């Protein structure tokens, strides 16, 4: 059903983007906000990156986009760009005024979440503040099927802005969407090996609802969908009680969120006489890993999270698909960190 929405989303986006700046005859300059946005733009641009396409990435590994404030250099880069690619759904909350100003100047700003929201695949009902109530969870990328929609939509918008390379972007998108199919099927097989009663991801903030929906796991976050909120004593105790009641053996720290709150939950659990361990490594949540690493790609980020969960629950990792790239490093598959 989701792939059927891709053609619809692409058509709508092309209509909306009519009259955008063309990059014909010069370098097509794109600014990507988050690490995930930078990765997908790089994949679609392929070997044009650094030649006909110039990509500027604003946020690095481990950076929390909920809290990130654009610097003067960021604003200058966005002012010079032909297109801004961002995640959306209030993830980059500090950018709202900048995006509005750029839109008034005619700079194309594209939210990767747009086709996902238009297709009705977002998870809503969250409150961020008095001004932002009943909003959608911004972590849509944790369902690879949502990321396929984002990829397809982005290729259409890039092709409209840079028509000379439209076919190139579309072909790269189609190849990548096939890769995401392989990733999703592998993840389903992998995560189904954990006993059903233990399929719960408990982490620092509520970043994994889409992951849970995609792979049929329960998810509990100590903080809300934004790390701007703070967990109180009652929140910590509620999660601790849930861990003890359900006998959940593992909790996870996130790469872009300080570990203090989860450590406090662990202490509250142990005070009730139950031992809970932390995952063998951090989970990627709002940001991917370091560039040039497995976790520094979208596929690697999702796969490494799955591998980390399996190793933490002491479950075997299934064979990696032959045609899925990048491949996980041997050291990641062979042994868990101490």
Image (tube, rainbow, N blue to C red):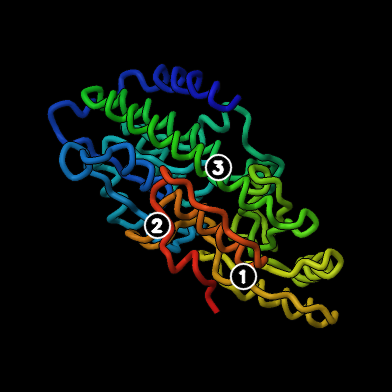
Using the image as rendered, state which of residue 72 and residue 305 is in the foreground: 305
Seen at 35% across and 38% down, the residue is 102
**Left or right of 37 in this view: 233:** right
Q: Position of residue 225 (x, y in %)?
A: 63, 53
Please say if 72 is above or below 235: above
Q: Position of residue 15 (x, y in %)?
A: 41, 17
Using the image as rendered, state which of residue 228 and residue 166 is in the foreground: 166
Seen at 34% across and 27% down, the residue is 170
Asked which secondary structure carries label 3, the reply is helix
In the rendered image, which residue does mark 1 sit on?
Answer: 279
**Is residue 65 in sight in this rendering?**
no
Q: Quadrant of residue 188?
A: top right
Q: Quadrant of residue 119?
A: top right
- Give the mark nearer the N terminus: 2 vs 1: 1
In the rendered image, which residue does mark 2 sit on?
Answer: 296
- Give the mark nearer the N terminus: 3 vs 2: 3
Quarter occupied by the N terminus: top right
Asked which secondary structure carries label 1, the reply is loop
Seen at 77% across and 72% down, the residue is 233
Alpha carbon separation for disc pair 3 and 1: 22 Å
Quarter occupied by the C terminus: bottom right
Of the residues tagged 3 and 2, which is closer to the observer? 3
Q: Quadrant of residue 11?
A: top left
- Give the mark nearer the N terminus: 3 vs 1: 3
In the rendered image, which residue does mark 3 sit on?
Answer: 184
Alpha carbon separation for disc pair 3 and 2: 18 Å
């Amino acid at each position: 059903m989701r792939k059927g929405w891709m053609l619809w989303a692409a058509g709508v986006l092309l209509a909306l983007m009519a009259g955008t700046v063309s990059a014909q005859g010069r370098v097509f300059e794109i600014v990507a906000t988050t690490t995930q946005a930078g990765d997908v733009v790089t994949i679609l641009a392929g070997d044009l990156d650094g030649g006909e396409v110039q990509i500027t990435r604003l946020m690095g590994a481990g950076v929390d986009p909920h809290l990130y404030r654009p610097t003067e250099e960021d604003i200058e880069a966005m002012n010079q760009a032909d297109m801004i690619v961002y995640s959306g759904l209030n993830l980059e909350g500090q950018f709202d005024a900048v995006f509005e100003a750029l839109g008034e100047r005619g700079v194309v700003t594209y939210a990767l979440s747009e086709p996902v929201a238009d297709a009705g695949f977002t998870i809503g009902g969250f409150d961020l503040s008095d001004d932002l109530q009943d909003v959608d969870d911004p972590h849509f990328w944790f369902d690879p099927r949502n990321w396929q929609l984002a990829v397809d939509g982005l290729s259409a918008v890039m092709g409209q802005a840079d028509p000379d390379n439209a076919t190139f972007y579309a072909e790269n998108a189609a190849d990548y969407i096939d890769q995401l199919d392989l990733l999703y099927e592998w993840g389903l097989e992998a995560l189904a090996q954990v006993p059903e009663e233990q399929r719960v991801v408990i982490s620092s903030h509520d970043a994994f609802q889409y992951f849970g929906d995609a792979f049929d796991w329960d998810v509990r976050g100590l903080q809300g969908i934004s790390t701007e909120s703070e967990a109180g004593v009652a929140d910590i105790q509620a999660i601790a009680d849930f861990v003890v009641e359900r006998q959940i053996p593992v909790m996870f720290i996130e790469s872009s969120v300080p570990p203090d709150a989860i450590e406090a939950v662990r202490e509250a659990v142990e005070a009730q006489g139950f031992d809970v361990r932390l995952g063998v490594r951090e989970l990627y949540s709002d940001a991917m890993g370091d560039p040039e690493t497995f976790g520094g790609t979208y596929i690697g980020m999702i796969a490494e999270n799955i591998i980390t969960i399996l190793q933490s629950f002491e479950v075997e990792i299934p064979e990696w698909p032959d045609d899925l790239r990048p491949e996980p490093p041997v050291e990641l598959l062979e042994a868990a960190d101490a």
